[in-house]
Image (cartoon, rainbow, N blue to C red):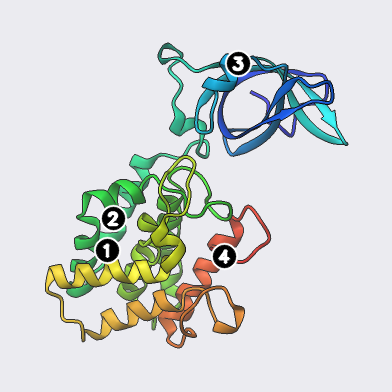
Amino acid sequence: MSTWQELKEGEKITGFFFVREKEMKQAINGSDYGSFLLERHLERIPAKMWDIGEELQKNVQKKTLVKVEGVISSYRNKKELTIQKMRLAKDDDKVNVTELLTKKGLSREVLWLELRTCMDDIQNESLKKLVMTVYGQRYIREKITTLPASKQRHHAYYAGELEHIVELCQTATQLFPLYQHVNRDIVLAACTLHNIGIVRVLDDPFAPSYTNEGKLLGQILLTFEIIHEAIFEAGIDKSNQELLHMKHCIASQYGPIDNAWGSAVNPSTPEAIFFHHIKELNAKVHTNSTESNE
């Protein structure tokens, strides 16, 4: 199937889409029309359906799956899809919403096995116990393996957070031989836990919105809440130095405070500096905008 960028004006398109946004409007002649933002395979496609009937107005809402037939058109020099036919997806269509809304080739199962391998590589007893306690919670496993890493910036797709974590672990592992003075256990634990608070920040893997907790407290504070809950549950000594240094990596993950990207403190240890830079690199390479990291 051709990508949105490859399609030319006048070409016809038929396929299944996720309705990211929907707004009913009125044309100059007084008729109702639907303005949509459709999504498939990380492409977001502006679309309009003229003279939309009452049934479609009622049934087609945000977060629904639809089958669309339309033609590529242009409005104010911008490409959009003019919908000619549209219906809700049915069970016998066998549309896999997770495949429709994530990066092609991404496998949650493979990524989870990779993450388990990274966790097993942690040798420090306290850090390993902490990581296993956090990921031992079913709701955390389910959310961290399905949520995007952000709403609109890096890895902003289904299971994007899991991919981000695994990529950080793999990058760190490749670089450890060049930076042998960096404590690998501290960095690997930071890779797996640095954004764990996202399970309380975002509410949905397909069309995420910020929770009240996420809006009022933010990702880093919620990450520390989960970590401290796990420390208490596992009976880990809070004065453990490796644990302290791992938390410093998380608190300073966005780099110097002067960046105003969200760090609570400046990175001031080899592990924190190392972690900040691999995270920044990974986020920027995978970003969907030119803004700072999320």
Residue 41 sits in quarter: top right
Number of the front mark, 3 or 2: 3
Q: Are marks 2 and 1 in contact (CB under 8 Å)?
A: yes
Badge 4: residue crowd in 10 Å (few <14, some 14–19, many ≥20): some
Estimate the x, y position of residue 78 in percent, counting from the top left.
82, 36
Distance Cα–Cα, label 4 vs label 2: 27 Å
Disc 4: which residue: 293
Q: Secondary structure at mark 2?
A: helix
> Is any part of residue 274 visible from this angle?
yes
Disc 2: which residue: 117
Q: Are marks 1 and 3 in contact (CB under 8 Å)?
A: no
Badge 1: residue crowd in 10 Å (few <14, some 14–19, many ≥20): some
Badge 3: residue crowd in 10 Å (few <14, some 14–19, many ≥20): few
Query: What's the amino acid at mark 2?
Result: Thr
Query: What's the amino acid at mark 1?
Result: Asp
Distance Cα–Cα, label 1 vs label 3: 58 Å
Badge 2: residue crowd in 10 Å (few <14, some 14–19, many ≥20): few
Q: Are marks 4 and 2 in contact (CB under 8 Å)?
A: no
Disc 1: which residue: 121
Q: Nearer the viewer, residue 135 or 45?
A: 45
Does residue 79 lie above or below 247 as drawn? above
Q: Nearer the viewer, residue 275 or 237?
A: 237
- Between disc 4 and disc 2, whose residue precedes? 2
Distance Cα–Cα, label 4 vs label 1: 27 Å
- Residue at far right of view: 77
Q: Left or right of 158: which side holds 126?
A: left
